[in-house]
Amino acid sequence: MRDVAVVGVGMNKWGELWEKDLRDLYVEAALLAIKDAGVDHVDSMYVGCMTSGLFNCQEHLGSLMADYLGVNPIPATRVESACASGGIAVRMGFMEVAGGFSDIVLVGGVEKMTDVSGDGATFALATACDQEWEAYNGITFPGLYAMMARAHMAKYGTKREHLAMVAVKNHENGFHNPNAQYRMKVTVEEVINSTKVAEPLNILDCSPITDGAAAIILTTVENAKKLGKPIIRIIGSGQATGTIALHSRADLAAIDATRFAADKAYKMAGKSPKDIQFAEVHDCFTIAELLIMEELGFVERGKSGPAVEAGETKVGGRIPINTSGGLKSKGHPVGATGVAQIIALVEQFRGEKGVCQVKGAKVGLTQNMGGSGGSSVVHILEAMS
Amino acid sequence: MRDVAVVGVGMNKWGELWEKDLRDLYVEAALLAIKDAGVDHVDSMYVGCMTSGLFNCQEHLGSLMADYLGVNPIPATRVESACASGGIAVRMGFMEVAGGFSDIVLVGGVEKMTDVSGDGATFALATACDQEWEAYNGITFPGLYAMMARAHMAKYGTKREHLAMVAVKNHENGFHNPNAQYRMKVTVEEVINSTKVAEPLNILDCSPITDGAAAIILTTVENAKKLGKPIIRIIGSGQATGTIALHSRADLAAIDATRFAADKAYKMAGKSPKDIQFAEVHDCFTIAELLIMEELGFVERGKSGPAVEAGETKVGGRIPINTSGGLKSKGHPVGATGVAQIIALVEQFRGEKGVCQVKGAKVGLTQNMGGSGGSSVVHILEAMS
């Protein structure tokens, strides 16, 4: 298996981008990544996207994006795993380079969510849960995560304020990210008093509806050296599934797929949770970040709330989480999220993060997941000195 | 790169399967393939599916299918490339085994098309073409392929009867396939006099709307030997893209993506068109089979019609095509089609095809494509004696 490096990154400023359609978003991010890498071609490409069929009446994204990027006839494959589509696209690209099938692979993720027709964004997103047993009966994602929050609060004594503190921290970080959708700081009080969505989650506990794309270029470490780029290796990749429906879980306050994916990634990388200096995780709702911290082994089970309260996950803390602003502040164009998490790590390794810089950043982790945790993918990256 | 073998196959009897939903179809085919292979587990799985979001209000198929098959937490990835989703899922599974990432991979394809709500199947399928420049303006797939047929007829003198002969041949083959949706023979006159869809294509020139799934088990040749299975190797895999919209093509009577994909597969396999004994190709419309025969190098450009008329592609002919009945008679549950093409080859290699058996079948080819040819994937399989 060949060593794989990330040599280029690119993304749009995310938000409600009325002047850009699905293909514009992808192509823009892809061109930025290609330019950043300094490559003159790519051998293959992936498109992570959840539900362009429902959002944009457009499938067949591999063909569409290769065409508009002007790179056909190269192979182009669209990968879908709900909100983990981007992270799993990264894994596919990683395997294609590591396995020796292609030398330079473009991995992009995209979602154009704001000008949805038909039954709207909530309906489209609900296709990530079990349609027949969950969505059809009226549950939505805030409702599912609200149940997980209630379970965690009941089992471990997690407080309402702990949830809010996740939003406060991520908005604090996103405030400094020029590509973030919501660059405003919020307070615990503002989160707790914001519009109710699904008890105990309010609007400021939820990630937003976002248009955006993100892209990276993967190649061999050998090629990366020739390109004169800093060597940022993908040293671990793990992917796993869990039950798609929440009612099938033994424990509503656990996300098994994330734990299994992390175990595989740690094993492949030869690292343990204590080796991870910082992470980007899938905070689609504030409760998700708490659950994930526990599954990744950053804190003991049930101790995530107090760890956030103690500032352990802030920049400068023991294990900074979502220094990019996370899904909460940066935005959550679902197919792009997992790819943008890799970009956030690369920016840290390159020392570009200003006040959000993790000093001496060498080893970071990304965790991306689909639905209420029915799929999850974890990557561990290391910057070579 | 490790050698990869197909050790198990399974599919449903395709058709209008009102009593089975999307997950039932996939799980049924997957269990048949697992049983056929004689394996007690799988390490990873893929789901080829085009547009379950629009057909079934359900995305996140990796998680859903792993869950209902009872195999989580293994990685499960959904791949989409319109009607080439299944073939590209096969390629992903092939790369995962060949690259040494997993030893036993399940690749399934599925589409549940008949109980679509909303704007219907024609609308859902049109998301495979360029939504903004083609579908939005009212074109449908029969219309796109009708233009390709007209171009081929004008350029090469291909006759209306040649198109009909493709349907006649494929229904003759499908008549003998117990899993085929439309097991009736048709005549040239019946095709020509059937209901008009888009001049010159009639209803009997078009593949049907189908519910169905197909699944295969891939593993290393080393493992296949241990399982005591006949060794059927994937010796070539090629994938390519073309322009998604028909109006961007230099020649409406060519499908570049298929030619590029075939070139790669031939090169990898160390084979040329004359080494191929039989093939399963993507006859979504009768004209498609003619175009594909030329792109695969089975006949000279413009000579596909006369070759079909001369019986060269019949069972017993020079290069039998679609001995399973093809999309036309067997049915076309779009995400499943590319996987079922592999099954059709395996059945030939195993000598199970009765009156449709290709004598001494050792080397076969599959060609699967998306939209009007915006993506294409070709596999070459060889049975080891």
Image (cartoon, coloured by chain):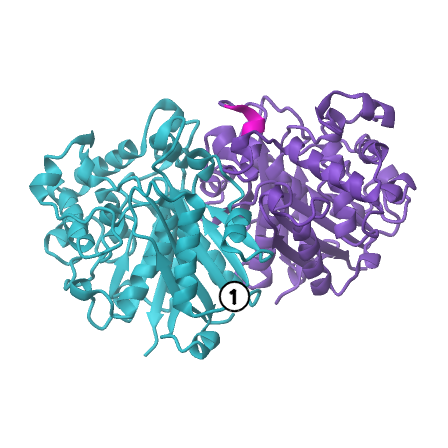
Chain colours: A purple, B cyan
Residue B184 appears in the rendering:
yes
Side of B381 relative to B69 (left or right)? left
Give the amino acid type for the residue marked by disc 1 in the picture.
His
Along the line of sight, the residue nearer the viewer: B322 or B254: B322
Residue B195 position within the rendered picture, expressed as x and y whole percent measured from the top left? 16, 31
Q: Relative to residue A167, is residue A339 depicted above or below?
A: below
Residue at the image point whose x is 74% and y is 43% from the top: A344
Q: Relative to residue B269, is residue A230 depicted above or below?
A: above
* Element under disc 1: loop
Q: Is residue B315 magenta?
A: no
Along the line of sight, the residue nearer the viewer: A154 or A333: A154
Side of B20 relative to A31 (left or right)? left
Secondary structure mostly seen in magenta is helix
Which quadrant would residue B363 be assigned to in this image?
A: bottom left
Residue at the image point whose x is 24% and y is 48% from the top: B289
Q: Which residues are magenta?
A: A119-123
Which quadrant would residue B225 be assigned to in this image?
A: bottom left
Residue B172 position within the rendered picture, expressed as x and y whole percent measured from the top left? 15, 53
| Tally of numbered tags | 1
Q: Quadrant of the C terminus of chain A?
A: bottom right
Residue that label 1 marks = B41
Residue A129 position within the rendered picture, expressed as x and y whole percent measured from the top left? 57, 39
